[in-house]
């Protein structure tokens, strides 16, 4: 089976090298040899440590009749969509690790692919075989909930901030050097990459349509050492979570945001570049999956598993349904209806009556306070940091309360809120 690798960067170069390094075991498992024959790059003069010929001419590769499978590892959305669509129209198989492409175009690609194999195991949670798990292993279940840490870069940053007091920027730089981050790392730290992955999982679990713009997405950029101080005081760990939860009336709650989770939860132990996904099925109960979420070699492992599936002629419906769910199969719950617990950090002038005004605003907006902490202030400081957590309440109430609080003249910094996932 001849393979073209469209994009020979962090992941593509590992795919090329592992196909050569492990060719005996891959041949034994696939039943045919899987041979990388050409790679597409922008800059053919760059050293990449691969033994395949490289070209910057996409058309000349796409039009080759001798290629059986095209592996798309370029990144981006519209350019790969154009390239992959053309390949599928030629009835050639595609494998991709590109979650951004799938977050926007998965249903159109599924329709275009028809019976042509289309593998995307590497698009979610790097080396963890989570697509196969959800689509095949758990196919008997109604999925109640998926809760996961699915972005390696942000988990690496948060872990290093919490465990080593490392600065956000330094941890991000290291994640980039290690090949974990997206070409534009704001996708990682802004929560968008995790949202792309969540939409892919939710399509398999619930048949959900929708784009990233339709769901709640918040990143980790505004988390400070003060939030980490609070988390330590109250035995929480801060993680960027992706949550899909079945709500009432055929609605599903989809959200990506940093969350405080209890130290006792298994997900709190998922550190560094590792990812962890818990899936709750109505028959199986909770099952949890753990493994490296980013990096060239781990991701290439998932890409090659798709190539082996294609060589074996394994056929699974791309998004898990033989009979496609209708447009209304499951709808996304409007984010203002989400209900959870909240933590917020307020920087205020240290004056008489501030606490009374704050608790009054919270009460008027239907918020019930669960805990409160005032960080002891430096003698010279005229400001103080207050931390609150609430009992379960509604997103629209907390947003309204924060908007009122922001307008008070004793507030000296934009209020910051993190959800608590219990
Ligand atoms: P990368 O290191 O930036 O590599 C991208 C490759 O694609 C480079 O070789 C680049 O060529 C080539 N390329 C990009 N646009 C091109 C164009 N228009 N024409 C020709 N070649 C083009 O990216 P990566 O980290 O390997 O990621 C690849 C894909 O896998 C992305 O969709 C990413 O989201 C996904 N992914 C990555 C990881 C990870 O851990 N890195 C994990 C899971 C999924 P030049 O080198 O010449 O610029
Ligand atoms: N940038 C992504 C991450 C790569 O850090 O998780 C894996 O999808």
Image: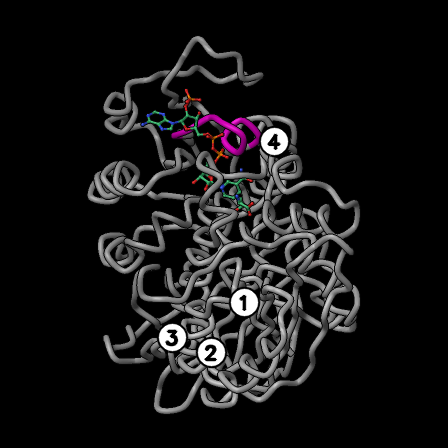
Badge 4: how crowded within 10 Å, few (<14), some, or many (20+)?
Answer: some
Residue numbers of the magenta segment: 6-14
Cβ–Cβ below 8 Å for labels 1 and 2?
yes
Is residue 27 visible to the viewer in this orientation of the structure? no
Residue displayed at 66% across by 46% down: 156
Residue in view at x 43 percent, y 53 percent: 192
Q: Observer-nearest residue: 386 or 122?
A: 386
Q: Residue 70, relative to residue 349: is it above or below?
A: above
- Earlier sequence position, callout 1 versus callout 2: 2
| Mark 3 vs mark 1, CA separation in Å | 15 Å
Labelled disc at residue 18: 4
Q: How many marks?
A: 4
Helix, strand or loop status at disc 4:
helix
Residue 417, label in figure: 1
* Residue that lies at the very extreme toward the top in this rendered image: 45
- Label whose residue precedes the other's in the sequence (2 or 3): 3
């Amino acid at each position: 089976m001849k393979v073209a690798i469209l994009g020979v960067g962090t992941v593509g170069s590992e795919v090329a090298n592992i196909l050569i390094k492990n060719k005996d075991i891959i041949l034994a498992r696939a039943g045919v040899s899987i041979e990388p024959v050409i790679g597409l790059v922008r800059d053919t003069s760059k050293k990449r440590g691969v033994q395949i010929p490289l070209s910057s001419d996409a058309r000349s590769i796409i039009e080759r009749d001798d290629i059986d499978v095209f592996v798309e590892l370029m990144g981006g959305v519209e350019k790969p969509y154009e390239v992959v669509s053309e390949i599928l129209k030629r009835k050639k198989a595609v494998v991709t690790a590109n979650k951004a492409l799938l977050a926007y175009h998965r249903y159109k690609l599924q329709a275009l692919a028809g019976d042509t194999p289309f593998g995307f195991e590497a698009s979610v949670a790097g080396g963890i075989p989570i697509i196969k798990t959800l689509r095949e292993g758990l196919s008997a279940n109604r999925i109640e909930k998926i809760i996961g840490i699915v972005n390696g870069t942000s988990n690496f940053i948060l872990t290093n901030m919490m465990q080593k007091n490392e600065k956000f920027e330094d941890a991000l730089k290291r994640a980039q050097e290690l090949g974990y981050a997206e070409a534009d790392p704001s996708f990682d730290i802004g929560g968008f990459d995790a949202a792309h992955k969540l939409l892919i999982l939710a399509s398999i679990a619930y048949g959900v349509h929708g784009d990233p713009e339709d769901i709640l997405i918040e990143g980790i950029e505004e988390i400070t050492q003060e939030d980490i101080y609070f988390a330590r005081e109250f035995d929480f760990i801060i993680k960027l979570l992706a949550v899909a939860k079945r709500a009432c009336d055929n609605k599903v709650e989809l959200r990506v945001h940093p969350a405080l989770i209890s130290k006792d939860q298994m997900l709190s132990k998922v550190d560094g570049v590792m990812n962890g996904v818990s899936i709750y099925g109505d028959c199986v109960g909770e099952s949890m999956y753990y493994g490296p979420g980013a990096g060239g070699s781990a991701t290439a492992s998932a890409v090659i598993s798709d190539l082996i599936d294609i060589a074996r002629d394994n056929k699974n419906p791309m998004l898990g349904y033989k009979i496609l769910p209708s447009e209304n199969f499951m709808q996304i719950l409007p984010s203002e209806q989400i209900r959870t617990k909240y933590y917020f950090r307020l920087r205020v002038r240290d004056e008489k009556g501030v606490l009374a005004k704050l608790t009054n605003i919270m009460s008027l907006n239907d918020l019930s306070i669960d805990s409160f902490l005032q960080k002891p202030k430096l003698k010279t400081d005229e400001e103080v940091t207050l931390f609150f957590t609430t009992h379960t309440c509604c997103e629209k109430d907390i947003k309204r309360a924060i908007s009122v609080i922001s307008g008070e003249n004793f507030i000296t910094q934009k209020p910051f809120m993190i959800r608590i996932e219990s």
